[in-house]
Structure formats: structure tokens, C-alpha cells
Image (tube, helix red, strand yellow):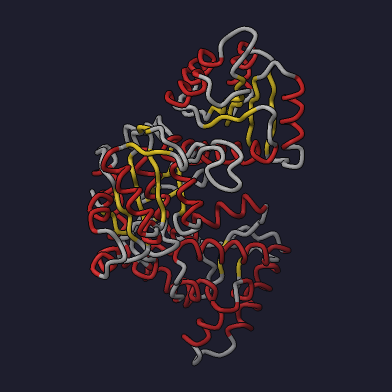
Amino acid sequence: MSNVLVIDDDRSVLRLIQNAFREQPDIKIVTAGSAQEGFSLLETAKADVVLLDVMLPDLSGLEAYRQVRAIDSKLPVIFITVGGTSDMVIEAMKLGAFDYLLKPLDLQRVREVVGQALEMRRLMHVPVRVHEKGALEINGDSLVGRAGQMQDVYKAIGRVASQDVAVLILGESGTGKELVARAIYHHSHRSNGPFLAVNCAALTESLLESELFGHEKGSFTGATSQRIGKFEQCTGGTLFMDEVGDMSPLMQSKVLRVLQEQQFERVGGTQTIRTDVRIIAATNLNLEQMVGEGKFREDLYYRLNGFTIKIPPLRQRREDILLILEWFLSRFRRELGKEVHGISPDALDMLLNYSWPGNVRQLQSVLKQALVQSTGPVLISEFFPTELRQQAAAHSESENGSSEKSSDFQAMIEDRLRAGSRNLYPRLPKRWSESSSRQSLRVRRAINRRQPIF
């Protein structure tokens, strides 16, 4: 549940915003008619976003904004104003306000801006933990892995986080590039500033330009109001640009100018806007090869490549699959309300031998699908997608009766449950505290003995 605090003395505005989110049960609107009432609600309501009227009866909007930031420096604040060019709004944007909304309010625009602010709040507020040893925590987001290549990633994050340089993260889709970017942000001196992400491959050139730089009212068809771009919203913070290799040559040149001069103009505007943004870029493409082929600007490549972090694909760190499975299983069974506590040997063997072209993201999706399909306390191979079972069958076609064994195994577990047995899920000792080679040996023994894992 996300809480949005609206501070405005106009009751019609409060009702309008409440109606805008009436069909979104995951968003709760909390209202206040004055600045002082709003300050009291900030802590009790645990607001994730604040909508703040410029003209309040007891305090100016700018002073109210300063006090809100003093209470919570990471809280996104959206101004509500009758005029988008007032000195107060301009000053607030300079100080780090997220955006502003014009009266009369456009409900679609309200939902859009609040949604963006809530996403920024989540990215800023939820830390990214590194799990390389010790007990796993299932709250928040995590980088999970103990393989040597992942140790190198953790070391790289530690080295570069405090250095105010551009970072280029390289890795296949689904390896966790955004998690690495957020880990860098959370350990940097910009952690009190905003963190925003934009996927350069998901938007057309014109939409990406507007998303990054903003636009002025009337600058193109459909530009009914001024819009603040990511470079302006992110001043003092960190901007994560995913899939930068997919940018057009024109966008590459415009981004290069921002990196060189730390200034830009909105689309259709003439005012030069200064910014102070740290760039973390990521791609699954080979930028060096693209530079050689003339598809990516060499000068932009060197600007982005202040420090490089390479994330290994999951198939190159198979010793981490068990740890990742354990973490996701603990997380998803709580989210989905499933009493699933183990994975059958056949299913585990299938998961360990799969190539995982979609990496950790695919493993996450596959495990969640299996949990949704599950009908007992142990995940068996029949609960997993067909393509995994087909590859497993091709890998071990000499073995017969694996499906029947899995079904027999499930029946055995259910019989033990009816008998009241508590010894259903033998665990590997000490949460995988042994070396990778000993882990693999123990897993193989468990599979051979047809014992459930976890």
C-alpha cells in the first residue's frame, strides 16, 4: 500500500484527487487542509508522495516544501499551482521538487505524475542488499550470489559507489543491471538525492527526448502543458539509463552534450537549464563493436565508460542457482500465500541443468509460475513450464520413468503430511556455508537419494 498525502485548502481539489485513485486500491489518499496539519500527518501516515498546494492559508508553499524536505529528504514533492511559471514553482524545482500540476487538474496527468513519483520513491527507499554469506533476508531487493564473478561485481560496486564518475554496466538481459545501479546509488554520497530510471529501448526517439529533457507547452502535437524531464527532476541525484546502445544517433549527440556541459533545453524551449546528475548506463549490446561499426558515438562511449562493471550470465555461475532458488522461494511463498517448502530432486536437477537464456529474471518468472501451479508442499517438475521439461528430457533421455518417480515422490510427501510427520524437508547444513565444490557434492547426493531440497 502506497500513501499519497495531499496538502491543499481547496476541498474540491482534495475530492478530485481522491476520485482519481478510487479504482486503485493499492494507493491510499490522505488529505490535509493546511501546512501544519500536513506536517503532523507526514510521520503518522508514512507518506510516499506529497502533493503540495503553492498557496496555503498558514504558510507559503516554498516554506512548506523546505519543512517537508527537512522531515524526509527523499520524499517526492509535487506542487499544485494555478500557473506554471510562478517564481515559487521555479524556485521549488531548483531545490529538487519532483514536478508540478496545473489547476484545473487533469486526472490522467495526476495519475501519471503520482505513479512516476511512487516508482522513484520505491527505487530510492528500498535498499538493494548483497547476499554473499549468512542468512538471507526476503524483504526488499537483493543481489544474490557467491560465485567468484559475483564477488568481483560486489567489489566493483564498493570501489565506484563513492566516486562521482559515470558507470557503465554490461550484461545480458535479466542479469540484474538495475539492481547493481541502485546498489551503487544507495552507497553513494548522492543517496539523499533522487534516483530515476529510463529504458532507452522502450521509447521512440521523440518520446525519449521528451522523457529525458522535458518539453514546453505547444512544442509538438499533444504537448498540452509543460513537462519536466528526467535530467531536471534528477538534479543532485542519479539517473539510470538502461539499454543506452539502442539510442538513435541524434539522441546520442544530445545526451553527450548534457554529459559534457551539464546543461540542456527542453524540447521547444529556449531557456538553458543546468543540472547536476550522475549517469549510470547499462546495455546488453557490445558498445565497443558498435563504435567500430559507426553505430555508437566513440566520444559518448568514453563519457559513459568512466568505470565498467560486467555482470556474468547465470549459466556462468551455476553454483548460485540454489541460493537464488532458496531466496525466491522464501519470498514468493509469502507473497502468494503458498505452503511450499521444497523442490523435488527431479525438478532441481532440471533447474540446475537448464541454460537460462533469460538469466535471473527468467528463473524468477519460472519459479513464480511453478508456485502458482503447485498443489502440494513440494515443487515437482510437472509444475514448471514445458520448455524446461523438454530440455531436461533431452538432457537425460536415457533415464526412464522420471515423471512417475516425481508423482510417487509427491504422494509420499502427502502421506507423511497425513501421518503428521514433521521431518519432510531435509536441509543442507548451515545455509550452504561450505565451499562451492562441497555444495555441489551434497546436492548431487541429495538428488541421487531422491531427497527434497530446502
Residue 403, quarter of the rendered image = bottom right
Q: Nearer the viewer, residue 118 or 353?
A: 118
Q: Is residue 68 left or right of residue 441?
A: right
Q: Is residue 365 above or below residue 118?
A: below
Measuring from the top left, give residue 44's x and y in whole percent. 62, 21
Measuring from the top left, give residue 368's x and y in whole percent. 60, 61
Which quadrant, please, contains the N terminus?
top right
Measuring from the top left, give residue 173's x and y in whole percent. 43, 63
Measuring from the top left, give residue 281's x and y in whole percent. 35, 51
Q: Is residue 297 left or right of residue 354?
A: left
Q: How many labels does the image show?
A: 0
Residue 260, quarter of the rendered image = top left
The single residue placed furthest to the top in the displayed view is 58
Q: Which of 134 and 179 is in front in this view?
A: 179
Q: Which of 35 and 436 is in front in this view?
A: 35
Q: In this view, does 181 lie to the left or right of 14?
A: left
Residue shown at the point (31%, 67%) measured from the top left: 437
- Confirm whether residue 46 shows in the render: no
Residue shown at the point (28%, 54%) measured from the top left: 309
Residue shown at the point (50%, 57%) measured from the top left: 204
- Confirm whether residue 361 shows in the render: yes
Residue shown at the point (56%, 11%) measured from the top left: 60
Q: Is residue 400 above or below residue 115?
A: below
